[in-house]
Amino acid sequence: MGKVPPAFSESARRRVFGRRLGRPLHGQRQDAIENLLPVLTLREEDLKQYGSLVPSVLFKNDKDCVLEIGFGNGEHLKAMMEARPDRTYIGAEPFINGMSAFLKSIKDMNHDNIRVWMDDAVMLCRSIKSESLSAIYILNPDPWPKKKHHKRRIVRAETLIEYHRILKPGGDFIMATDVDDLAEWMVTETMNHGGFEWQAKNAKDWQTMPEGWHITTRYAAKGEKAGRRQSYLLFKKSSLLT
Ligand SMILES: C[S@@+](CC[C@H](N)C(=O)[O-])C[C@H]1O[C@@H](n2cnc3c(N)ncnc32)[C@H](O)[C@@H]1O
């Protein structure tokens, strides 16, 4: 367990910008929030101490653990669970309508390998033990286009320190967006961190859906319909900081 940095103070712990509540929930979605969320959620006390949450203890096994940040309705998270049942998963999404859609969609699946957090992913990341995740996915994060809001972006210098810390050496850091400015920002910030290696060798590599990509999410599909191109930004944690 690491020393608690000043950034893990009460005020810095939890910051969610954007919507948490949308349309009222009914039927199976309401049912999923009332009955499945309490079973699958991480508890506040699991997140109290910096660097203390150990995925292998949480899941009681040493399988590769994958985190998806801001999973929306969870189409990609569910597709990963179906394609790779040999791994464990943690999903963070503060928007209750997204969480209810995801939980409803997995209600008949095996739940041994999934845990969720309906709150700030950065707070969750600060709680996770160093070098304990095999991959982190951040797909179509909110762009916060105004310059004064850039500090709200989920990929920024401060959060990259945590993503890098909790990934295993060689772990995958995978992002996607159809907002060109944001793609440029995410590549620049990630490269500036100095501890990640961009896997793209040429433009085609980030402009083309990688082999084995699990699914096109609702946001990505909407963007494609509107004529926007998705950028696939695949990085690996390198052992050396430059
Ligand atoms: C544009 S949506 C994309 C959803 C999904 N990844 C997709 O591709 O369809 C961005 C998501 O990030 C979530 N989000 C925003 N701030 C967050 C935070 N601090 N922690 C976790 N998720 C967050 C939002 O609630 C929203 O669902």
Image: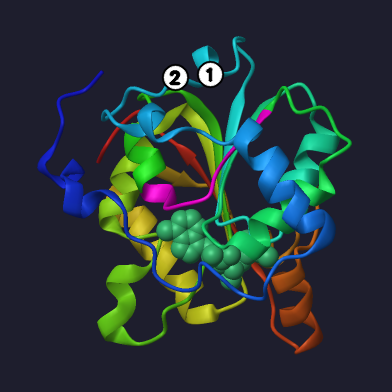
Q: Is residue 54 magenta?
A: no
Q: CA distance from mark 1 to mark 2?
A: 6 Å
Quarter occupied by the C terminus:
top left
7 w.r.t. 28: above or below: above
Residues rendered magenta in the picture = 114-122
Kindly check if marks 1 and 2 are in contact, taking CB atoms under 8 A apart as contact.
yes
The residue tagged 2 is: 54
Task: Please rate how many residues cluster around mark 1, counting C-alpha atoms within 10 Å: few if below 14, some from 14 to 19, many from 20.
Answer: some
Q: Residue at x 75, y 28 (%)?
A: 111
Q: Nearer the viewer, residue 208 or 227?
A: 227
Q: Residue at x 60, y 34 (%)?
A: 66
Per the image, label 1 sits on a secondary structure element best described as helix
Amino acid on which disc 1 is placed: Leu
Task: Please rate how many residues cluster around mark 2, counting C-alpha atoms within 10 Å: few if below 14, some from 14 to 19, many from 20.
Answer: some
- Asked whether mark 2 lies closer than 8 Å to ligand 1, one says no
Amino acid on which disc 2 is placed: Val
Q: Is residue 86 left or right of residue 187?
A: right
- Can residue 128 be seen here? The reply is no
Residue 84, x across and y down, in percent: 79, 30
The residue tagged 1 is: 58
